[in-house]
């Protein structure tokens, strides 16, 4: 189904249904035009409105047929009753790819909405046109400048997302950008009347720009095909799945949202496990896993070293790692002695056996301690954690951002041992400020930054699960051989 | 053990070990003086340092014995080697209550530290003096102006906390203040060489200023007594417990932190369940439960209405409520019709059967919808949720704070039906700003505000669990009868 390429590489786009008022609080066609302009789309953008005029510096055409050149891709923002006519025009105009932002179809529960959706889908199949949607935000593809919000990053990456919710799409793209997740493409695909979750996963499994696939799915059109496609995709790249509407009440909401049908917890759990897909339970975990697969090299074990400040925080950090399925090995006496030499105040209230607690020791010993722990061959990975709200005085956070962040970066650059950060206890403006500086620094140096210790630990554990399960499948000779690398993928 | 009163109602406090440099980045005695001054302690504060001089406008006495008046309470910030001599002086001076901030005792692992700790504890028992600590932050009691940080709220409330970690204590007090949790007292009690967790819970169970007890505990000195005290306390008020060091690695960390001994997961689970204590698994949940018990009236069932914006967010909200053990009843046709009448744009992409999704409808219909749902007798509680990062444009958040927060407050004030808020997807500065405004408004109007839907749902479910279990115990005639009220405790 490589005709999906038309969605990601259009030379020209018509945005049909652009208000003459331009971009306002009310989202509409002009927002798509604005987003394409802001994110650097290089081709022609043709706004369409029967009234004509000008929008965002562009000439507005009265209809699709009035556009002088060819149109590869149409974003449809007109009301449902006008959509069938537009699809006819698309065929006449030689358009191959249509995104229906328009809502009011099967998700509305109305018979009329369902009927029009079915008609459009049948017509698309007959005429060789492809439709994303209806009732969705469409395509984000930074490589070719496609976007649906003007604030989205234009830096391309290797994570692809298919997302049945527009709101979740906004969250994933923005949150990903703050944390260093870069996208090959994101498809907000709504009701999936034509192009569906199986088409998209199959396409992304073969997409050379995509190394990791993540999906938020409310319903599946064809269960058997989905199971087949998913298993095949998960053999060649990690596939992260968040299933929405897994409960009866959630499923009722999903029916109103995207007209999706229910799927039981048990069926999904079995399906995902068998395919070696990575199941997550909320959006934060979805972004966590995309981040983890983007930055962590394959690690050979689950032995983590933990370093941070705060006695209680350190105790709970160890509990969280164990709960998540990691191991926290006791450090050798030699390593503990080395660490002890860096301390300025004796080892009062400080544990050095792993986890390591550097409470009240000043920020300037963190470099030596992190460096020493990264060099220790008894661990596979280092978790640095920082609870911002536990400082005796908030003024201490100044030292954190000015001293420690550069030292962490230095130690990380000097080592091949992977490292992650967990930053939490964000209570007030001062903490938020320190947190955002930390998140930015982590993004710059390629250290995955999580928002709680348990989230960090779960992400690492799921990352290990995935590779262990894949190895097992490969040993059984059932899977394609996939090369392993110990390099940081960066 | 009502002599613990001496810790909370001192007329005069000596802070022994105050650097002449005053308050600096390095935490020490001067910070305690500063905290007492800032939080409105009305009695005499006597800083002590052999060098004399002046600190924060107060005369510094060379020794405890040089202080002219009587001293009720001593905060000890000198090094461990000097502590035995100070305790002797305390007895001579008639001091009844000592807080040992000093560390380096049993938690250091050194034989010398353990020996001194035991000596001091024995001496305290013999001489009728009581000690909090060592290795802890001591007492926060806003009613009498006791505090260990200058930024702590001076507004008293009815939640008491005992906390074996100083860092966690900072987090709980600050985070509580942001969310509307007000404290009767918090005791950071460290190694518990004399006053221990059982003494404190017993004291707080009888404390008239305390309606809810929360505890972070790493180790227990006397398991049988603890079980007895806990069961008795939990019969008269809710007791929330976070056990740190529940895993082997966490326990190793706890030994380094407060010299605590391990306790297995199974033992703790059984113990807490039997006592009808509320078990939580992290600090956020601990504050969640303190907040929930502070503001929610007893509710008669688990039927929740869910209202928010965002299709995907709404789907996951329903899933989270069901997962947590709540029910999300389908609304009557009449109620759905009423809600539909408020919609401005038809019911495109909007579910009204519960959960209710008001995506893309503008902020100004929220008041009517919330009011209508609060009036509906098919639900016991309303959950309002808001995902900040999913807005098509961040500018939409302006409308949120200026319009919707006042409307929520109005609807809440006009109803007796309890309501909570879940605010999440805090991605960037704009979201943080909207979030803090929302949190502040919720605090002002007495609506518990949680940081995720699942946390809100779990808190409500645990709140229901507690009352259901307590009713069962009372029906069996085993417990003291405790009056029920349907008033909002405010």
Image (spheres, coloured by chain):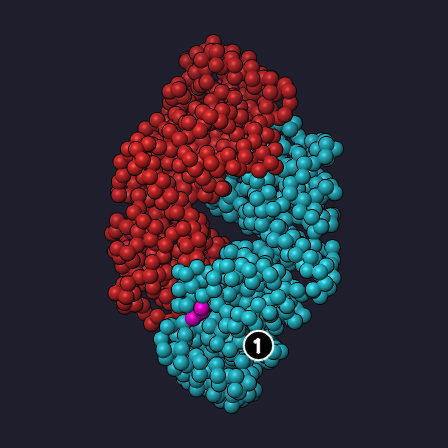
Chain colours: A cyan, B red
Number of dots carrying numbers = 1
Name which residue lies at 45% across and 27% down.
Answer: B226
Front-most of residues A343 and A133: A133
Quadrant of res B486? top left
Name which residue lies at 40% across and 26% down.
Answer: B202
- Is residue B4 left or right of B374 when viewed as pictured? right
Query: Is disc 1 surrounded by few (<14), some (14 to 19) or many (20+) residues within 10 Å?
Result: many
Name which residue lies at 70% across and 43% down.
Answer: A379
Name which residue lies at 61% across and 53% down.
Answer: A462
Query: Where residue B443 sits: x, y (%)?
Result: 36, 45
Quadrant of res B272? top left
Give the dominant element type of the magenta stretch: helix, strand or loop.
loop
Quadrant in the picture for the N terminus of chain A? bottom right
Query: Where residue A99 sits: x, y (%)?
Result: 50, 77
Identify the chain of the residue marked 1, using the numbered disc in the image: A
Q: Which residues are magenta?
A: A257-261
Q: Is residue A259 magenta?
A: yes
Quadrant in the picture for the C terminus of chain A? bottom right
Q: Is residue B319 visible?
A: yes
Residue wearing tag 1: A7
Q: Is residue A249 magenta?
A: no
Q: Is residue B317 visible?
A: no
Relative vertical location of residue B415 with respect to residue B31 in this rendering, above or below: below
Query: Where residue A223 sits: x, y (%)?
Result: 53, 70
Relative vertical location of residue B99 with respect to residue A51 in this rendering, above or below: above
* Mark 1, secondary structure of its residue: helix
Residue furthest to the top? B92
Relative vertical location of residue B294 with respect to residue A27 in this rendering, above or below: above
Query: Where residue A235 sits: x, y (%)?
Result: 66, 64
């Amino acid at each position: 189904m490589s005709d999906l390429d038309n969605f990601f590489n259009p030379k020209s786009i018509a945005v049909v249904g652009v208000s003459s008022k331009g971009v306002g609080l009310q989202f509409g066609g002009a927002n798509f035009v604005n987003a394409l302009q802001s994110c650097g789309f290089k081709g022609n953008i043709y706004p369409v409105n029967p009234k004509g005029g000008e929008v965002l510096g562009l000439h507005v055409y009265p209809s699709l047929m009035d556009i002088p050149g060819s149109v590869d891709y149409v974003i449809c923002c007109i009301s449902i009753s006008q959509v069938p006519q537009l699809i006819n025009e698309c065929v006449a105009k030689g358009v191959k790819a249509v995104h229906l932002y328009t809502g009011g179809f099967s998700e509305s529960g109305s018979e009329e909405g369902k009927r029009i959706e079915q008609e459009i889908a049948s017509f698309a199949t007959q005429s060789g046109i492809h439709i994303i949607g209806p009732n969705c935000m469409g395509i984000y593809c930074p490589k070719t400048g496609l976007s649906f919000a003007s604030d989205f990053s234009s830096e391309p990456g290797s994570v692809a997302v298919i997302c049945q919710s527009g709101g979740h799409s906004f969250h994933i793209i923005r949150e990903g950008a703050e944390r260093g997740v870069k996208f090959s493409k994101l498809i907000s695909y709504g009701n999936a009347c034509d192009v569906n979750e199986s088409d998209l996963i199959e396409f992304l499994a073969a997409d050379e720009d995509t190394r990791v696939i993540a999906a938020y799915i409310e319903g599946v059109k064809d269960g058997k095909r989905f199971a087949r496609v998913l298993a095949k995709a998960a053999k060649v790249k990690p596939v992260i799945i968040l299933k929405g509407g897994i409960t009866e009440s959630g499923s009722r909401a999903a029916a109103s949202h995207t007209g999706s049908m229910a799927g039981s917890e048990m069926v999904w759990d079995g399906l995902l496990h068998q395919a070696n897909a990575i199941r997550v339970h909320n959006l934060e975990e979805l972004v966590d896993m995309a981040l983890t697969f983007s930055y962590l090299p394959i690690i050979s074990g689950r032995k983590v070293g933990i370093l941070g400040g705060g006695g209680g925080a350190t105790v709970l950090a160890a509990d969280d790692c164990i709960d998540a399925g990691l191991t926290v090995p006791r450090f050798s006496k030699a390593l503990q002695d080395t660490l002890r030499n860096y301390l300025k105040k004796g080892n009062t209230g400080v544990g050095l056996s792993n986890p390591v607690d550097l409470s009240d020791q000043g920020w300037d010993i963190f470099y030596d301690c992190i460096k020493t722990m990264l060099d220790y061959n008894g661990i596979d990975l280092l978790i640095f954690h920082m609870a911002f709200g536990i400082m005796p005085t908030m003024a201490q956070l100044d030292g954190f951002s000015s001293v420690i962040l550069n030292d962490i970066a230095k130690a990380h650059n000097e080592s091949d041992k992977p490292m992650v950060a967990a930053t939490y206890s964000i209570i007030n403006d001062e903490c938020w400020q320190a947190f955002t500086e930390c998140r930015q620094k982590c993004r710059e140096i390629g250290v995955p930054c999580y928002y709680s210790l348990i989230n960090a630990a779960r992400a690492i554990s799921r990352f290990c699960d995935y590779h262990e399960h894949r190895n097992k499948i490969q040993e059984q000779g059932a899977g394609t051989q996939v090369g392993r690398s110990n390099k940081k993928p960066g």
